Image (cartoon, rainbow, N blue to C red):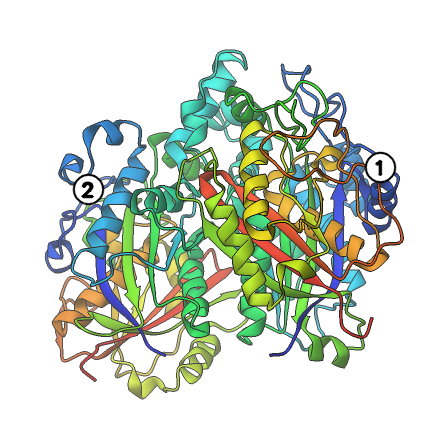
Amino acid sequence: MGIYIKGAGVISIQEPLSEEGVFHPVAYTTPQVRCVEPEFRKFIDPMAARRMSRIVKRAVVSAAVALENSGISMPDAIISGTGLGCVEDTEKFLDAMVRQGEYCLQPTFFIQSTHNTISSQIAIRLKCRGYNNTHVHRGISFESALLDAWLLFAKGQIHSALVGGYDELTPTYFRLLGRLGYWRETVTDSLQIVREPAEGTFAGEGSVCFALSDESTGAWGQLEGVSIAYRCPDFMQAAEHFLTCCGIGWEGVDVVMMGLNGDRRNDAVYRQLQLPDVRKRAVYKPVCGEFFTAPAYGMYAAAVALKNGVLPASLSESGVAVEGIRRILLLNHWDGKDYSFILLSSCGN
Amino acid sequence: MENVVVSGMGIISALGCGVEETCRALREECSGIGPLRYLQTEHLEIPCAEVKCSDVELQEKLGLFSEEIAPRTVLFGMMALEEAWRSAGLSSSGGVRLAFINGTTVGGMEKSEQYYLDFLKNDIWNTYIASHECGACTEKIADRMGGFSYVTTLSTACSSAANAIILGENLVRAGLTDIAVVGGSECLTKFHLNGFNTLMILDREPCRPFDASRVGLNLGEGAAYVVLERESTARQRGVQPLCRLAGYGNACDAFHQTASSDDGVGATLAMNGALKMSGLQPSEIDYINAHGTGTRNNDVSEGRAIMNVFGERIPWVSSTKAMTGHTTSASGAVEAVISILALRHGFIPANLRFREAMPELTFTPVTHTLENVKVRNVLSNSFGFGGNNSSLIFSALSES
């Protein structure tokens, strides 16, 4: 069995629905950056769009773009990861309830507050009645969703799927997470954030959807493996074990792409890894910002790199583009508790 | 194909604390629904099925003596996990790989709604900002026992726990874990009580699923987990399996964010999917533990789906939500435990307060506990907002 990336639709803090951001990302100077949105009315009827929250609009458009040119008209499964879910509508309902009491509430915001609104709205628009699920586990929500899809592909239960990572961050929730020490107070150049370690990082957002298939025609790359681990005692050993399960060793990996974000405590976990010297190292969080499903953007950046056969300078830790790459290992951790591993390869192997 | 079996389970709900209390309450047709005692809300006129313990009492039962009280979702989760863990003879150093998959939607909302204004102004309750996320609650529950190397959280509203069971089955079958402890936990919150209230689907009286005069549901709370593993793993560990998980179906109604389709297309697909995977004929299902919320919409949609799948020969059907209330994200696991109890003890739990048949349906639910019946295969339905429909089939092991 092979699982192939047949398309992707990405809305992030970079140019929407375009690979431009991967090659020539914009640098930001604020600790919170929100998505640059496409013109939704090009994709969604304005009447329907009015009833959708921001995260749902983004997700629906990401899904539509992922399907375009993928050769998949109706996916067998829709599986989403979202760390925080539909924060904006949750907050609106909560705020009204706390401030105005429990007798003058409207259902609208409650209806779209549940995390599974994203997967179900995508399904409703596509009239897709297949497997549908939503993973909501912190910084590995997307990888958990990807593994769910992997298991179904492996069983032969599905032959195609839309798998995505979606997170929005309201100014209020940004402030709340700031109280927990997530963010820096000032950012001078988001693209350089990993080179200037400090306490905290900068916040992004994202809506990243992949069309996956067990058929390889025109694919961007192949998903060779995905795994998650909790309270992993030895990150390095776990990464090696993961590669072994994928049937390769370090020599098969050209690039190791890591979730470095400039926060000292976060980055220390990656710095401790004794990676073989020849591996090129890459980052993606300086491009997309930190959010719970940022690894979905990482996988997108890696897929774009494989499709084009080059690791862009913007992602390379050394700042120099790397040609002729064939396989990328993505490593991520959240809070030193949740770990994830993704292996992608180019289809030209 | 080797059996994936249930080797242990734990539960807490309005019917009581633990499998034994729950079983007794079910057979005696107890209802956990009544006036609110613990949830601080303006809507005291709305009956709910609360777990009959304050947070402090739950902390004491768990031997937690910190000043800082964990979200109730976490406390329920710990209670149910500990029971499931013990009953399956698990150990954190047993040399087996353990996974924990939790279904929840409200997560730590119960604290967030209480301290929201403080969150905005000061640092006093930062700990509850950290425990707001669903995943953070799951990790607190998992850490109660330790030893889990795979932990994740699912949220598909009222089918969350059923989907956790499905994911656990897939993980075990793929050999990515030896054992998966799966289910869900959810406490009542003002947030979803008011949400359901604005949708006008809450009954002001104790609910009556599948009754012609039904007007809505009653919310409940609780947690439940089942322990899944391959039959050979259980036998090697010297644990007697309770039953097997014979099949599951997951489908999306793809109709409306909060309503089910009139013809129950998603529900039909979920039930048929579970039957197909189990290799069982519809006639071999002895009992359906229905989703049966008691809303106008669900019961007609689910009822029609049951008719689609089972035709003329409809098995015994009951909704135990008239006893437990609708435990939302936990309901898939609460009702999995109830289904397994029915299977193990040979009884069919009652669908309380049913009086008059629905004109749309050809069947009526079981109104009083049926004892001494042979129950070999049970189908349990869980349907969530967004059309997230899942069905599970639990079957007796061939030699038992």
Q: Nearer the viewer, residue A304 or A233?
A: A304
Residue B359 in picture, x, y percent from top left: 61, 29
Q: Quadrant of the C terminus of chain A?
A: bottom left
- Determine the chain carrying the residue at label 2: A
- Disc 2/disc 1 C-alpha distance (Å): 63 Å
User: Which label lies toward us, 2 or 1?
Assistant: 1
Residue A192 visible at all = no
Q: What residue is rendered at 45% in x and 22% in y?
A: A107
Q: Could you tell me if the residues under marks 2 and 1 are in contact, i.e. CB atoms within 8 Å?
A: no
User: Which SS class for mark 1?
Assistant: loop
Total label count? 2
Which one is in front, B178 or A29?
Answer: B178
Depth check, front residue: B290 or A122: B290
Say which of A253 and B180 sits in front.
B180
Does residue B304 sit above or below A328 in this rendering?
A: above
Side (left or right) of B394 relative to B29: left
Instruction: Mark yes or no: residue B246 visible.
Output: yes
Q: Quadrant of the N terminus of chain A?
A: bottom left
Write down the residue under mark 2.
A29
Q: Amino acid at mark 1?
A: Glu
Q: Quadrant of residue B221?
A: top right
Give the amino acid at mark 2: Thr
- In the displayed structure, does residue B317 sit left or right of residue A109? right
Q: Do the residues indicated by labels 2 and 1 lie within the same chain of the protein?
A: no
Q: Is residue A61 left or right of residue A145?
A: left
Q: Secondary structure at mark 2?
A: loop
Circle 1 sits on which residue?
A: B29
